[in-house]
Amino acid sequence: MTRGEYGQSLDLVVCGLSTAGATHGDRLESDDLIAAAQRGDEEAFRLLYREVQPRLLRYLRTLVPCDAEDVAADVWLEIARGIQGFRGDVDDFRGWAATIARHRALDLLRRVRRRPGVDIPVEELTQLAAADDTAGGALDALSTDTAVALIATLPRDQAEAVMLRVVVGLSAEAAGEVLGKRPGAIRTAAHRGLRRLAERLGHPDRPAGRRRETTVRLRKR
Amino acid sequence: MGRGAVPGLDASAAESLLRGDLGHAGAPDVLVHLLTAATAPARPHELDGEEAALAAFRAPALAPGHPSRRRTLVTRLLTVKVTAAFALTAAGGVALAAVDALPRIPGVSSLGSRFGGRATSGAGLAPGATTSGAGRQSASPRSTPTPLPSTHPSPENLCLLLLADRPTGPAGIGSSGLDSQALATLIALAGGDPAAVGPYCSRLLGVPVRPASQLPSPASAATPANPASPTAPLSPQPRSASLSARPSPSASKSHSPRPSPVPTSSQPDPNAADRSPSSTPATRSATVSSSRGGHR
């Protein structure tokens, strides 16, 4: 598996289907994009933004649910300043952006926690989780926010591992670099997180036949 | 996919989900739904920061110092204009004193009108001088009886000088480019308390100095000119005259030679402080462009 396939689903979605990126969606050549942005090409930077920002934002929601937008804005300032010195492809770029985002978010968490009387974000997450229990029966209609909030109810290492891998689109190795852990630890955390989510969602355990149909249909795409 | 702890999620299914392969056989539908929702297309509000990010991208070298850069520009412009004004004022004052200062006190106003007394000056940057110039010409017949310290700039100009030369923060008052006499005057105007100088000036000038509309009206600018204080350096005519006597281009030209009515010995620092922040983006962009070249 090449690294490029990690982020595939969101690439297609973000740049192929969304109105904003529709015209450029078919030309997301990663290395070209980075190089063009480094030459000062605004459109390339815009595409990078559209490709990465939704992922970053959702990842940040698991860390700092109430300040994700603000932190993401800071992250893009830093990216804009540092992109000249960046080396790598779009996958690396996602990892770089996630690293910046994580640092910023953790800085914020440290500041917030230092102040007494301020809600600890983890508590907010569990509240979100409680709200999501009611949505268990209507999983088909799960909104993105609910899904992210559900993932955010996991222990943080698991939530981060799942988000970095599935949503940000990083390999276990790249996620490990972001989190400062070994790939094996990332895998373990992510698998545990998925299992816990499945448990929490009640695993309706649909008939295998239907699932395979879905699989085949999806694969044909 | 037996009914273990988590049915339907073995390691390979989990791994394929994590890779984004949401159609992998053996993955529970609930998880597929969940992760599909989590990786759904970008919604418009998620891209709200796009223009801000692009703006930062357009000016990466300036982005970190944006506010300070703006401040530096204003400060520098003020410095230029005010310094020029100060120089001309001093010269005018001397000339005035040499010609016929004492016998003809009303001559002050005549001198002022001879130079036009127009309100040009800072064109919004130093509107205190502007308004006072306009206001005073009409007010000049009212015999402002204290043209004596005519070598001093008006309170507004003193404040502008202080503002322009102050390196950063109020601590710089003592080390600002104002000469001691001017500073003493300013302190006296502010009520004798050095700490009151800042509030006094901000009251006088209006805090955001740029838009003329936000600045004190001519009336309020003239308030410190109450005749009660004989020490108040109130000889606006020569000052506004000199301000208007020079078209602004000459004022900006005079930037590089930088006339020094202020004791230069005591103030190389404010100048350096003025320039260094602006040189940083320049050097940064230089490095940026060189690294660009290197990348290509």
Image: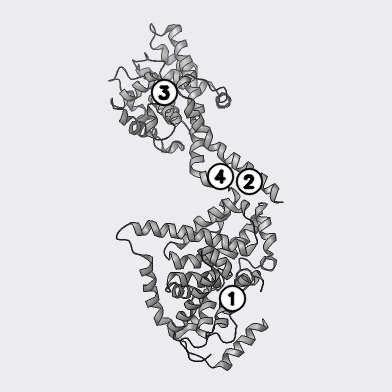
Q: Residue furthest right?
A: B296
Same chain under badges 4 and 1? The reply is yes
Same chain under badges 3 and 2? The reply is yes
Q: Is residue A14 left or right of residue B110?
A: right
Q: Give the label on residue B20, or none.
A: 1
For the point 56% across and 51% down, which residue is it?
B56
Chain at numbered mark 1: B
Pointer 3: what residue?
B178
Which of pointers 2 and 4 lies earlier in the amino acid sequence?
4
Distance, label 2 to label 1, CA atoms, is 36 Å
| Residue B149 drawn at (x, y percent) | 37, 15
Distance, label 4 to label 1, CA atoms, is 38 Å
Determine whether label 3 and label 2 are within 8 Å by CB.
no
Q: Give the label on residue B6, or none.
A: none
| Residue B83 drawn at (x, y percent) | 49, 24
Pointer 2: what residue?
B288
Same chain under badges 4 and 3? The reply is yes
Can residue B116 be seen here?
A: no
Chain at numbered mark 3: B
Give the structural element (helix, strand or loop) at label 1: loop
Which of pointers 4 and 1 lies earlier in the amino acid sequence?
1
Distance, label 4 to label 3, CA atoms, is 31 Å
Q: Is residue A129 left or right of residue A11?
A: left
Q: Using the image, determine if residue A194 lies above or below residue B98.
A: below
Between marks 3 and 1 in the image, the one whose residue lies nearer the viewer = 1
Distance, label 3 to label 2, CA atoms, is 39 Å
Determine whether label 4 and label 1 are within 8 Å by CB.
no
Query: Which amino acid type is marked by label 4?
Result: Leu
Query: Which amino acid type is marked by label 3?
Result: Leu
Which of pointers 2 and 1 lies earlier in the amino acid sequence?
1
